[in-house]
Structure formats: C-alpha cells, structure tokens
C-alpha cells in the first residue's frame, strides 16, 4: 500500500472482492504493507487507549497538514490502520474533522464483520485521529 492510495481506489479494490474471506485477506495484505514503527515510537504518548490489541499512532505535522503512521501487534488491526491512513493522512486538521469515514467504511463492507472489541478499537483510533486534528486546527 502506498500513501498515494485514495479512498476511491481503496473502495474499488474492495469492490472486486466477493467474499468476506477475500476482503479479510486483502485487509491482512494492507497490514503487511505498513512500515513498522520503531521501538522508540512505540511509547505511551503514541499508544491508543481503548483497543484490545496494542496500537500506536504517530502524527507528523507539515505546515497545516497531518500525516499519520501506525502500528499494531495484530495484523488485522494493522490493516485497519492502513485504511484509516488512506482516509485521513495528508489532510489539514479541518479536513480531517470534516471527514466522515462511515460512507467509505460501509462501501468496504468491513464493520459488520469486526468483533465488538475490534469495532471499539477502530472507533478509538478514529477518535484519536480526530483529537489530533482538533488540536492541530485549534478546535
């Protein structure tokens, strides 16, 4: 997965996959493609609370844009992080706050296949990204 992937490309990729098993495999592939964080980047400040798996999100600010990198001890969660990076990374704080991920996530047909714990963790990651965006935009 490249940072240049768009939400539309992600939806197109998932639309070619007929079964949940194929989508799950692609999600794992997205997770494998993420560059891991360094041990120093895996720290309490980057740790996302509310996830059953260990999750870390690093935010980098370049002018008014925020870029995110993430990692997890779970490959499926790494795939979920990859999806969030496509949806949010490289946008301004205000653009992130205005982005509703629900329509894209519905098109990916993933959420109903997540366990309640994974869904809660996914929501916690989105919450963390939105909080970073609010902080960056002064909201």
Image (cartoon, rainbow, N blue to C red):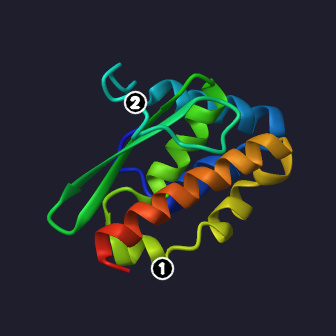
Residue 31 falls left or right of residue 58: right
Whole-percent x, y for residue 15 in the image: 69, 53
Task: Mark 2 or mark 1: name the one nearer the start of the chain.
Answer: 2
Cα separation between marks 2 and 1: 29 Å
Residue located at (63% from left, 64% from top) = 104
Residue 18 against residue 28 in the figure, above or below: below
Residue 37 falls left or right of residue 48: left
Whole-percent x, y for residue 3 in the image: 35, 46
Whole-percent x, y for residue 19 in the image: 83, 40
Residue 105 falls left or right of residue 86: right
Q: Nearer the viewer, residue 42 or 83?
A: 42
Residue 44 against residue 105 in the figure, above or below: above
Q: Is residue 114 visible?
A: no
- Please state, as top left, top right, bottom left or bottom right, where the N terminus lies in the image: top left
Q: How many marks?
A: 2
Residue 98: assigned label: 1
Residue located at (46% from left, 64% from top) = 131
Q: Residue 65 lies in what quarter of the image? A: bottom left
Residue located at (37% from left, 78% from top) = 94
Residue at the disc numbered 2: 43
Whole-percent x, y for residue 45 in the image: 39, 40
Q: Nearer the viewer, residue 74 or 47?
A: 47
Query: Few, some or many C-alpha atoms within 10 Å of disc 2 (few <14, some 14-19, many ≥20)?
Result: few
Please, which residue is most extreme toward the top here?
39
Residue located at (57% from left, 57% from top) = 126
Query: Few, some or many C-alpha atoms within 10 Å of disc 1 (few <14, some 14-19, many ≥20)?
Result: few
């Amino acid at each position: 997965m490249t940072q240049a992937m768009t939400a539309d490309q992600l939806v197109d990729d998932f639309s070619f996959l007929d079964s949940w098993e194929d989508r799950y495999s692609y999600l794992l592939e997205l997770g494998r493609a993420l560059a891991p964080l360094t041990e120093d980047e895996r720290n309490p400040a980057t740790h996302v609370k509310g996830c059953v798996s260990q999750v870390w999100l690093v935010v980098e600010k370049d002018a008014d844009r925020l870029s995110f990198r993430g990692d997890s001890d779970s490959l499926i969660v790494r795939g979920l992080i990859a999806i969030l990076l496509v949806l949010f990374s490289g946008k301004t704080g205000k653009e992130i706050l205005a982005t509703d991920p629900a329509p894209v996530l519905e098109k990916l047909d993933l959420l109903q296949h997540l366990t309640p714990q994974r869904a809660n963790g996914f929501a916690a990651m989105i919450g963390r990204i939105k909080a970073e965006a609010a902080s960056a935009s002064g909201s």
